[in-house]
Amino acid sequence: MIIYHGSKNIITKPEFGKGNIANDYGLGFYCTENIELAKEWACSDKVTNGYANIYEIELKDLKVLDLRDDKYSILNWIAILLKFRSFIIYSPIANQAKDYILKNFYIDVSKYDIIIGYRADDSYFSFAKDFINNTISVEQLALAMRLGKLGYQVVLKSKKAFDNVKYLGSEKAETKVYYLKRAKRDNVARETYFNNYRQHIVTNGLF
């Protein structure tokens, strides 16, 4: 698999154990199979250029949790988010929902070398929060996750995965181009969600 990591820096050797434990899937090295998305992720402000770092990884001997598989649902993804990300819970019912989802849908990610799944970018994370707080149904959430085409991320979790990755090079991402693309993609997702999902009352969905 060829993967790309968007960053302010050129990273020739990803380091196991570095990063933010409160990311979507916990501590890990976050990548994508889409170089354009990596360039957008690299440009988080209007001033600083970034890089799409390019890697090759052999998956044959690695244990991969692919949340795109039909045997998993959007609730498995939500459960992993609830485990690692911080949510503001507005009511006792939402707290009860959180406990129920973690108990019934959480997958122990420590057993895997690589995870492939949705990326909870700014807009996607707000959709997930709305579901936890009973603003939208799970069916609406599943549809909303396709808005803006924010794509999937490939996360290296284990030392074995880090040992199997090979740096191939880097491409520069100019922030004057890719910051605007990033902002536009997020805005499209938010506007479509607000107009087509959040404003609509659903009476027969799963909450």
Image (cartoon, grey):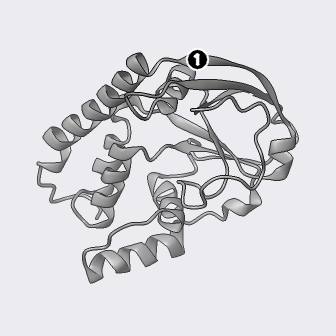
**Closer to us: 156 or 104:** 156
Say which residue label 1 marks.
172
The image quarter containing residue 132 is bottom left
Q: Position of residue 157 (x, y in %)?
A: 72, 51
Question: In which quadrant of the rendered image does the C terminus lie?
Answer: bottom left
Q: Position of residue 6 (x, y in %)?
A: 58, 31
Q: How many residues crowd mark 1 within 10 Å: few (<14), some (14–19), many (20+)?
A: some
Question: In which quadrant of the rendered image does the N terminus lie?
Answer: top right
Q: Is residue 185 left or right of residue 78?
A: left
**Closer to us: 189 or 141:** 189
Q: Is residue 191 left or right of residue 34?
A: left
**Residue at the image position 58 percent from the left and 17 percent from the top:** 172
**Residue at the image position 43 percent from the left and 33 percent from the top:** 150
Q: Amino acid at mark 1?
A: Lys
**Closer to us: 72 or 88:** 88
**Residue at the image position 59 percent from the left and 55 percent from the top:** 25
Q: Is residue 36 above or below residue 59?
A: above
Q: Is residue 199 left or right of residue 110?
A: left
The image quarter containing residue 2 is top right
Q: Position of residue 82 (x, y in %)?
A: 47, 65
